[in-house]
Amino acid sequence: MNTLRIFALEAKYEFLKSWRLPIYSLSTLAFPLMFYAIFGLSFGNQNAGPVNTATYMLATYGAFGTIGAALFGFGVGVAVERGQGWMRLKRASPMPPLAYFFAKIALALLFGALIVLGMTLLGTLAGKVSLEPLTWLRLFGVLLLGVFPFCALGLFFGYVLGPNSAPGVLNLVYLPMAFASGLWVPLEALPKALQSVAPFLPPYHYAQLALRTLGAGRGENPWLHALALVGFTLAFLALALWAYRRDEGKTYG
Amino acid sequence: MVHSLTDVVHKPPGPAVLERVSKHYGSVKALEDVSLEVRAGEVLALLGPNGAGKTTAVSLMLGLMRPGSGRVTLFGQDPGSPRARQRAGAMLQLSGVPQTLRVRELIDLFRSYYPAPLPLERVVEAAQLEGILHRLYGQLSGGQKQRVHFALAVCGDPDVLFLDEPTVGMDVESRRSFWSQVRSLARAGKTVLLTTHYLEEADALADRVVVLNQGRVTAEGTPAEIKARTAGRQIRAVTRLSPDLVRRLPGVTSVQAKGTALQVLAVRAEPVVAELLRLDPGLSDLEVTGAGLEEAFLALTTPAEKEAVR
Ligand SMILES: Nc1ncnc2c1ncn2[C@@H]1O[C@H](COP(=O)(O)OP(=O)(O)OP(=O)(O)O)[C@@H](O)[C@H]1O
Ligand SMILES: [Mg+2]
């Protein structure tokens, strides 16, 4: 037995398991790409601050896609595995519990990376995106590093939702939250009332950090955004822990 | 026989032990002051009807939940401890497996959790997975899925196996061959705890049977002893005698009202029939048959209060 090997296998099979569910991989990967193609590229010539719209939206739609991969990977994944009893069998096994979460994080990062790469390719070939390699790497890094609050939020929902209701409820959280955080249309184009809500939503801070790597966004202090994301992560983890205990009590007494 | 003090002190506890354990779900008393030891090397059958508390007992031993009161140990440790779990394998009643993983992959994953797992060929042989290793779990029949669950339980070569209703959904032939797999595990020195509704299954496999009903241990012994307690005759008759009265007759083990008739289980039929006829000369439709194992078993586990309800 080798702990590293367990982690690696756990991640490998987490990937295969999801990849073989076309509904899941398609909706996670294809929807953000499609949205980017429709909204990001069709307004590509306009300017959004210092960069063109296609570039600006590479950051915001990139954030939209990676959030989806994290939220659904954890939320639907945990809800389904609880429902089918796979979670129970694994909890009874000697698997190190961290391996389970590691695998889900690895999958969210992999899907997130594929989404950002796909959008970059689209934007570069079909739109007006042309980024310095170093700038792009910084954007890519921020987008990947910033998914943790959404993993934690997904985990919480995974423990409170049933396998059938999970996708629907998650969409009800995901889509409005993304919209109100300025991921679909820049914040400046949203009604004032919505603009004032944005700082209370985690995707806002995430997207601002991503935009910053392009020299765009609102130019607020990045440390405040980072701090907000850490705070959200901790709060969601606490909620997830509460939900886990509650679920354990319900299912197992 | 009286054990000497040293015997008592030095006898190591069995692989899995419940000590005066209670577990309630809200107002449901799933287990009530149950003490139960799974001894090293034995096949122990936990026998009981639906809702008896079998799954609850297994879940406690696997550390899936904590007891309300009492103590649970697995190899002398907390059942949640990784070291204890590396020596246990389980087939759970309510477990499912991701539909989109192949049988080979599932076994590969579970083998990785254990320090000295069985080689894949041995797992295939033990769980009879020839020809389905490459299939996706979601494409298997119910019985094949059961075999995969068994494979996941044994693939780590654990010292103790927990099998919660392992033969549910198996046809007669699969059940027989499953039994022979369990027997060969026992011969190899494994400890096995299995739960079942069937006295027949307990009889076929177990060294020892613990009967659980409504959260309490109601009988314990070798399969032969349990069978002896439940062996007897079934008497059926339409009578005006009340079940309560009949229940007090000597030799009667249980009484159930079935419409206008009474169904009586007794160790021997003749004295009971004689007594019934004496008390109720108008008794009719008398029928005496050998009690099937299942009726006898139900008599053993059906609580008296329930029988009294007409
Ligand atoms: N999560 C739960 N919440 C509430 N009650 C429960 C829960 N799990 C079990 N129970 C109740 O506890 C009692 C014992 O259940 P348990 O599952 O241990 O029985 P069992 O002997 O395994 O039954 P079966 O043969 O049907 O599998 C039953 O009355 C059941 O309804
Ligand atoms: Mg059960």
Image: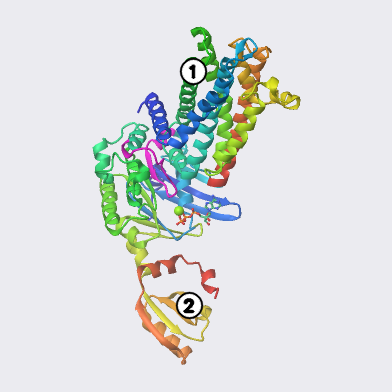
Report whether residue B40 is seen.
no
Badge 1 and badge 2 in a common chain: no
Which residue is under mark 2? B258
Number of other residues with Cα within 10 Å of mark 1, as a class: few under 14, some 14 to 19, many 20 or more:
some
Q: Nearer the viewer, residue A150 or B204?
A: A150
Q: Nearer the viewer, residue B166 or A176?
A: A176
Left or right of residue B74, residue B122 in this image: left
> Which residue lies at the image location 59% right of the left edge and 31% below the top edge?
A153
Q: Which chain does the numbered disc 1 sit on?
A: A
Q: Nearer the viewer, residue A34 or B283?
A: A34
x then y, percent, for residue B58: 44, 48
Which residue is under mark 1? A126
Report whether residue B237 is seen.
yes
Tell me the magenta residue range.
B82-104
Under circle 1, the secondary element is helix
Residue farthest toward the bottom in the current orientation of the protein = B281
